[in-house]
Image: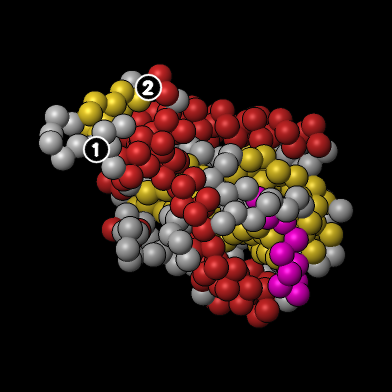
Amino acid sequence: PMKIVVAQINVTVGDFAGNAARIRKAVDAAREAGARLVVCPEMALSGYPAEDLWLRDDFCDQCTAELVKLAPYCLDVAVVVGYPHREGRTRYNAAAVLRGGRIEHVYFKQKLPNYRVFDEKRYFETGNRACVFEVEGRKVGLTICEDLWFPEPAAQAKAAGAELLLSINASPFNRSQQAERYQKMGARVKETQLPLLYVHGTGGQDEIVFDGASFALDSDGMVGYQAETFREAIDIVEFEGKSVRGTMAKPLTEEETIYRALMTGVGDYVNKNRFPGVLLGLSGGIDSALVLAICVDALGADRVHAVMMPSDYTASI
């Protein structure tokens, strides 16, 4: 079987060096495990969503410079890294395949979401070509997030010889999102009869949270690997024949999932903005108690300062 490292990492918009350090850690894990492919999430090097920062030449160029610095670290391992690709005034939501100390392939996202929190048509042009690359004699078809919500990019990758569909993602969490992912990815598997590996990031960025929960589907649509929800992870999966196998994380209840989402959003908003902590005005009610618990679990009690509101309606504790 071919070993693949799933780098379910928590990156920060604009922290190119810090994001690259997380990717290098995943490459180290691949070498230790004897894996020849590392897969990072969509826009792993720049962070997502960078919004109007993507329109700045210096932002894109600094990110590309970090990508070029990362390439020599990827001599014996192929590493898929999401980043914004700039050609003059044109930008693409891109993924590079780093190997042999160079940028071996570049893929441009073909389906740009423009609904809810997404505004990608404002920033990026669309790609139109498949990207299929070889690792240990197996051909991997690379796609980015929204691509596999539609049949065409998957069919295009199969026509180009892909034996495995690979999807890198930055997909904001909502309560029904994972079920939708299984449904959409399952449809692509059914159409192509190819196994699929879905790699997702985790963490909070401004008002959005990403839940991780990377997974793999065999060619018959059965789940062969399931990563943790709202946890960073560097997992090893094995691709052989028509299946991708790995560890299976314990399922969470809906309440546990939502609580982790709230903790992640609070913790990363405070930490990524380098705030020292939070100050809470408490009424003594259940809602105040819940907010206090979330903040303490996300940040630690020493970074949470609570003040009881001076009111006749404040409940006693």
Q: Is residue 43 visible?
A: no
Comparing 154 with 116, the one in front is 116
Question: Amino acid type of disc 2?
Answer: Arg
Comparing 272 with 18, the one in front is 272
Q: Is residue 280 left or right of residue 47?
A: left
Residue 252, percent from left and from top: 59, 54
Comparing 298 with 89, the one in front is 298
- At label 2, counting other C-alpha atoms closer than 10 Å, the crowd grade (few under 14, some 14-19, many 20 or more) is some
Coloring applied to the structure: secondary structure
Question: Amino acid type of disc 1?
Answer: Ala
User: Residue 303: which disc?
Assistant: 2
The quadrant in which residue 134 appears is: bottom right
Q: Mark 1 and mark 2: span between their CA atoms?
A: 24 Å
Q: Residue at x 77, y 52 (%)?
A: 246
User: Residue 27: which disc?
Assistant: none
Q: Secondary structure at mark 1?
A: loop
- At label 1, counting other C-alpha atoms closer than 10 Å, the crowd grade (few under 14, some 14-19, many 20 or more) is few
Looking at the rendering, in which quadrant would you find the C terminus? top left
Q: Is residue 253 left or right of residue 207?
A: right
Q: Is residue 131 visible?
A: yes
Q: Is residue 101 left or right of residue 218?
A: left
Q: Nearer the viewer, mark 1 or mark 2?
A: 1
Q: Earlier in the sequence, mark 1 or mark 2?
A: 2
- Magenta highlight range: 218-227
Residue wearing tag 1: 315
Please check the rendered image and state whether residue 219 is part of the magenta-colored stretch, yes or no.
yes
